Image (tube, rainbow, N blue to C red):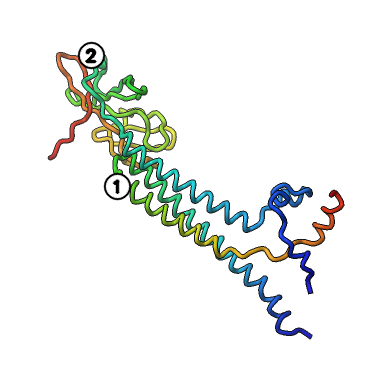
Amino acid sequence: MSDFREAQNQAHPNKTNTLMVGILSLLIGILAIQIWLLYSALNNALAQNFDIAVASFVGSTVLFIMALWLLRYVPQPRIVRKKHRERESKYE
Amino acid sequence: MASTSDNEKIPNWKSDFPILEEEATHVSRREFAKFLCLLSGGLVLGNAGIVIKSIAFPSQPLEGEHLICTAVEVPVGEMKAFVIKGKSEVPYILIRLHENVWRAFEQKCTHLSCAVRYRPDLKKIECPCHHGYFDADTGRVLQGPPPRPLPQLEVVVRDEQVYVKAKTETIT
């Protein structure tokens, strides 16, 4: 019969998975915006519009800080694969 | 209950250089997230490079007048390619649209730097790589992938000699 702790343990990996997928999706979204900013900065700089380059640099930096901040919420690995460690120990 | 040895932290030297091949080739989602952040930082550096380049090393306008050819060398409706040597060799094209109407543009397409050419039958400048078309009079983009107009030079004809110089902005 399952108790509260077991239910928690079962639920937690799923939450971690959702969190991880969410963070990865946000990071990919941030990267996509940064690539777009870089492209527009380059095109405008070549057309002598330097203001766009400065604005996109500021925007890109803010997005980078956001990406770093998101790393705080990346879940810690909880389980060391025991089987692998046992296999590794054969070589040690 | 899981034993404490299961949750033991693997030292960095071991996780970076694992013994098993499958461990070495495995990329965890944590590592992937960190890699995405690294890419993000790289894009910031790229953006910073553009800002530094545009502020510290702006492109210099062409200095002085350069003799290209005599007027009789280019018939009406034809073009002539030429190069101006400076810090780097920049290729240009000289077009004679009408008897007394001359235009000079940079020959590098603003899309992917293919060499553009004047098409007398269309009266347009064509980039043959991706079929981009530019207005032969102003250099603006008419069709295709080029994002910017062709950089233009001013043409001066004096004593049947054709010179080019940096285009001066005129307010109309």
Local crowd size for mark 2, using a 10 Å CA cut-off: few (<14), some (14–19), many (≥20): some
Q: Which mark is residue B70?
A: 2
Q: Residue at x 38, y 41 (%)?
A: B50
Q: Residue at x 44, y 43 (%)?
A: B46
Closer to us: A17 or A67? A67
- Amino acid type, label 1: Asp
Would residue B82 be seen by someone viewing this image from the given angle? no
- Amino acid type, label 2: Thr
Label 2 vs label 1, nearer the camera = 1
Q: Position of residue A78 (x, y in %)?
A: 69, 66
Residue, disc 1:
A51
Closer to us: A35 or B44? B44
Q: Give the image quarter of residue A74.
A: bottom right
Give the SS element for disc 1. Answer: helix
Q: Position of residue B154 (x, y in %)?
A: 21, 27
Above or below for B82 versus B147: above
Above or below for B151 versus B82: below
Local crowd size for mark 1, using a 10 Å CA cut-off: few (<14), some (14–19), many (≥20): some
Closer to us: A71 or B72? A71
The residue sitting at the right extreme is A90
Q: Is residue B154 left or right of residue A89?
A: left
Q: Give the image quarter of residue B148.
A: top left
If the image is split into quadrants, where does the N terminus of chain A sit?
A: bottom right
Q: Position of residue A25 (x, y in %)?
A: 54, 61
Give the SS element for disc 2. Answer: strand
Q: Chain of mark 1?
A: A
Quote the CA–CA distance across marks 2 and 1. Answer: 41 Å
User: Cβ–Cβ below 8 Å for labels 2 and 1?
Assistant: no
Q: Residue at x 21, y 24 (%)?
A: B155
